[in-house]
Every structure is written in C-alpha cells, then in structure tokens.
Amino acid sequence: MRNTVRDPGALALPPSQLHLLAYRSTFETASVRILVCDRKLIVRDVNPALLETEGLDRSAFVGRPLSEVMGKAVYERRLPQVEAALAGQAQTTVEWGLRRATRGQLLRIRHEPVRDEAGQVIGVLLTMEDRTDLHELEQRVSMQDEVIRQTSDALAVVDRAFNFLWANPAYAMIWNRLPEEVVGVPVPDVIGMDGFEERVLPHLTRCFAGEVVQYELVKRRADGEETHFSVRLEPLNDDDDILIGAIVNMRDVTETAQLDRRMRRQALLDTLTELANRHALESEIGRRIELCAEQSGGCEECRTALLLVDLDDFKVVNDLAGHTAGDALLRQVASLLKSLDPNAFVARLGGDEFALVVDIADEAGAAALGERVVHSIEAVGFSWNGELFSIGASVGIALLDREAFAASTPTAQDVLNWADRACLVAKEKGGARLSVFHPDDDEMRARFEEIGNFQVVQNALQHDRFELFVMPVAPVDDTSRPWHEVLLRVISEDGRPLPPAGFIAAAERHGLMNRVDRWVVETVLQRLPELPADAHLSINLSGQSVGDPIFCDFLLSALDAAAVAPGRLAFEITETSAVRSMETALELIAGLKARGVGVVLDDFGSGLSSFGYLRRFDVDMLKIDGNIIGNVREDKVQQTIVAGIVAVAEVMQVRVVAEYVEDRETLEVLRGLGVSLVQGFYIGRPVSWGDVFGR
C-alpha cells in the first residue's frame, strides 16, 4: 500500500478532513510503534505507542534529527534500511532491540518510503512491532514439531472417514513409507485391508464413539519375526468440541512382550530339569478335567491318568554325595520320564517328586505305564565320583474316569491329592511299587488314615500341640488317695483333643514315639514340683523307648536332674515291650528302681509266658491286661487267671492293678479276688491335667 501526502512541507496530509481523521485515528491507536521522518532525516511525527515505550514526550522526537533520536549505534545500524527506503525500496528486518527501552525485545522493523501525489519519495515511515511473545510461541511450536518428528513413538491422526490427516516419520516408517506417502491415504491402503478390518476397525469405531482405547497390535516382519505395538487411540475434537477423528499413538513394546513371554514361560518351568512345574501341572490337569466334564457324567471311559512319582532313597544320594549329585540325578530321572511316553505331559512338583499326565485307555494301561516307571528307575545306575547309587520309585495313580466324577466334578487339587494318597500307600508298603487310588478302597482308606494320623503327630511335635490328661487308679478299699496315670492327647488346630488310638499307633509305626515320650517326660518333670506332696503319677513308655538305649540314658539323666522324691513317680512298661527288649528293659528297670522310681508291668497276662518272665523283672505293680478283666464277672476261667496273678503278686510282694473296670459288679468281683487297685470309667474317666491339678 502506497503512503502519500499532498503537501511535502506537511508530509502530504490527506486532502479531505475525513481522510485526515481516519489517518490520525489509525496513527494514534496503532499498537505498533511509528516514527515518520523527512528526506533530511528530521523526525516529523511519532505515535503514542512509541512514546509510551520510550517513556518520553513528543518534544524529544519531533523536529530533531533521526541520528540524535536513535543514538549513534542504532542510527548507524538502521541507516542502510533508511537510505533504501528513501530510494523507494521498503526494508524489513527482525532484530533484538538495542535501546534501553527495547532491550530484550525481538522487533520486526519496517522502513517504508512515503510518497507525494506525484509518487516522489518525501520521507520514511518506520514501524516497530514487538514479536517477542510470537517468537517464543513459534520456538515452542517448532520445538514440539521437532520432538514429534524425532520421537520414537509413532503418531498419526485419522479422520472419521478413515483417512490419514497427518503422520510423523516414526509412524510412516512402520508401514515402510514416508510421511507424505501416508497423509490423505485411507488407513486400509496403508496397513492392509485384512489388518484393518480384524485388528484396527473395531478399536477405531469405539474411539469415534468417544472412548479412549488401548490395545496391542502384532505385526509380522518380512523376516518372519513379530513386532509388538502398544496402541492408544484418543478422540480428537475441533474448537467446537465436535469429534473429527482419532489421535493414534503406537509404541514398540516388542522387548517388553518378549520379556513377559519369557517370564510367563519361566513361571511354568522347573529351572533345574526344564520340565513343567507344579503350577503348569495343575493347569494341565484342570484342562483335562474340563474336557472330561464336557461329556455327560464325566468320561465314558478312562482317557487320562495322573502318575505321581516319588523317588525312594533320594535323600541317601543327597546326604552322601551332596546336592550337586542330587541335582544331576533329578535331571537324569527327568530325561528318563520324558522318554517313556513322548506324548506325556511330564512335570516336577518339587524335591524328588515328578508327575506324568497321559492319555490312557483304562486302569490296566495306567498301571502298565506305572510299572514301566518303577522298573526303569530301579534300573538307573547313578554313578557319582566313582560311587554307584541305586534308587527306586513309589508311584501313585489317579484316574479321570466315571468314578472320579461320581459325586461332583473334581478340582486339579483333588486329583493331585488322590495320586498323592496312592503314592503314600505305595511308599508305606515298602516303596518300589505302584498303587491306584480308589475312593472306596478300605485298605487305602485305612492306610491313608494312618498316614494322616502320622502327620498329625508330626505337626503336634513341631507346634507343641500336645496336652496331658490323667486317669485315676484307686484302691478298692478307699484307704488311700488315688494316684494318676498320665495320658496324652493331641490337640487339633481348632482346639479339640483327639482320641489317642489312631495317632499313637501311627507314631509307633513311623518311629516317632521316642520323641513323644520325651515330650511327656520333660513336661511331667517340669510340672511335678508344683503338685501336692501326696500326688503320685505313672507315665507310660512305648516299646520303642524301652528298647532304645539312648532314650533310656536320657530318661535316667532327666530323673537325676529333677531330683524326684522316692515314690512319687512310676513308669508303666508293657509286658510285650519288656520281653522284646529284655536286656535293655532290665537295665532301665534297675536304673529306675535305684532312683526310687516305681515300675508297673502293664498289660500283664497278654503273653503265653507271662509267669515265666515275671521272675526276671523287679517291678512294683502288675497291671492286668484289660482283655482278661473284660468279662471277669461271668467267666470262671478269667476269674481263675486273676486269682492266680494275685497269688503270684503276693508271693513277689507286688500290688495288682485291674483296668477296664466299667461297673460296680466288676469292682466287687475283683475285690473278692484280692485285687488291690482298680482303674476304669467306673472309677474315673480321663480328664485334663488342669482339671485335677489346677494347671
């Protein structure tokens, strides 16, 4: 636009007053800073914006030379542009302000020629515009553009017609294109129609409904490898908040996906043997159960068997050759089991336990495979550092057949428990054999009940879940205070005392009675000083303890340390255990007697040679076997046996105790036969220690 004035002396003011008013209004209100000078470079006018910036009035500018107004440095810098404008050429520069008032500002400075009506240049119009904020904004935008351009995240914008509006280089590179080869192109043409309809369209549709969508996209490369992308779609709205498209953000997560896959695989893998682990086994059993459950009432016939394999004598290898040898043996067994059936699912549960899940026709087929496992492991000759070790295996088999689904659909843990029960039975029978679980098998039920009792005792020993009970032994004539036989109860996890029959037998069978007896002895000796002086107790000793010299030494040492007063304590030893461990029993009896501790020969009369052995045992009492007392009221033979025992006891100067006294009639018969002490429910039932002694 040409700047003109009518009168050169007045810088060619507009001829009409209206035009003049418009010019002055624009000049006065412009936000840009304006200065006008003539050809002699004398300042003729400035606008308020310039005065405000400089903090001066018009007199500091108007009528003064431009060089004086600008200052020497600024004038010399601007003079080339001013001269160019006087020559008719407009000049524009962008530079940082040099004057005190404009320092730190980025100025857009324009020098334009001012012409008269004839087109002659009569002066210069100089405008200065502060572009600092705009420059900073442009810098930020430029920086953001560069970040978007260089970021590893793949970014794109898709409109509602499924065309690309924009894409950065990272996004275009995924599809082997340049950004300009993506913009304006339909999405299916870039990523492929199959990939679009199956893997992208459903997610874009949700995004266009206003939802932020995240999903994973897998792209197969030309070399066959897979690239995993995490994709995020966000709705894109215009200034009127109308949804116009979707912002696509794709991030390469291949390394993370591979790591996750490795971790998930390791979570299902036994690292030592590279077999499946217990978690993977449970998943496989669960999958097989679902397949069977899909059929009405479970499998029509057995199709799946679980074989649980527990190595016998593995601890020997670990103890004698070390854990490194044990690990090597486990790897050897793992390879062997995998070779027995290539289609079997083989797992290691932990320790020396393995499992096989196999498709099998019937129980006979499962048992045949179990026999192969037993014989194959027996045939393993494991050599370590020149020493040869032989091991065996106990195998428990559980079948997924109609019987397994009879009550309800089993869980994976149910099936594992079944196989574990069968395996424990096989091991209890001596190992190196197999056992098949059947829920109605009486022998297996009894065996497992015993195993359960054994585990109860183990748990009680570990967590101190025993409690002492006492049962009175009273004189028939009530001439003295009863003494008490100490009994033991196992306390269940819910606080109930369990009956002794099952767990005592299990503890004896599994060699735990020494530890149980030790607990009873230590506990009684600890509590004995707190009891009244006339309280007398008897403690039962198991056959294992009586026959164990180490236990006998412990018992005598414990009595010495406790300094038990003579006559306050007695130990009951069964006739059978005394006869079985004759020499050890005789030494123990002598040691007890020497310390003033009484000895009761329990269950007397149960053996055929009771009287023959009696002379060798220096005891204080005979406790007649309960089977003899049971029907003594009516059975003349039993009465004769009791009378004979009483007669022998009188000669040996020992007292006689009759147990299993359940009623008054039996008590009276025994009184008539000369029995001095009686015990049984009629005399008093077992009660807790605290109920009698206050603790």
Image: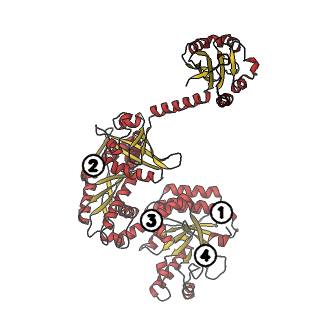
Which numbered circle lies on residue 452? 3
Q: Which residue lies under the disc numbered 2? A: 336
- The local secondary structure at tag 4 comes to strand
Kind of residue at disc 3: Gly
Residue type for callout 4: Pro
Name the residue carrying label 4: 472
Q: Earlier in the sequence, mark 3 or mark 4?
A: 3
The local secondary structure at tag 1 comes to helix
Q: Position of residue 321 (x, y in %)?
A: 38, 42
Q: Secondary structure at mark 3?
A: helix
Q: Which residue is mark 1?
A: 527
The percent coordinates of residue 638 (x first, y second) are 46, 84
In front: mark 3 or mark 2?
A: 2
* Residue 296 occupies quadrant: bottom left
| Amino acid type, callout 1 | Arg
Question: As displayed, is residue 661 above or below residue 53?
Answer: below
User: 116 and 51: which one is in front?
Assistant: 116
- What amino acid is labelled 2 in the image? Leu
Residue at left offset 26%, top offset 62%: 366
Reading the chain from its start, which is encountered first: label 4 or label 1?
4
Q: Which label's residue is closer to the chain start, 3 or 1?
A: 3
Foreground: 643 or 73? 73
Which type of secondary structure does the marked residue at label 2 adopt? Answer: helix
Measure the C-alpha gap from mark 3 to mark 4. 31 Å
Residue 323 seen: no
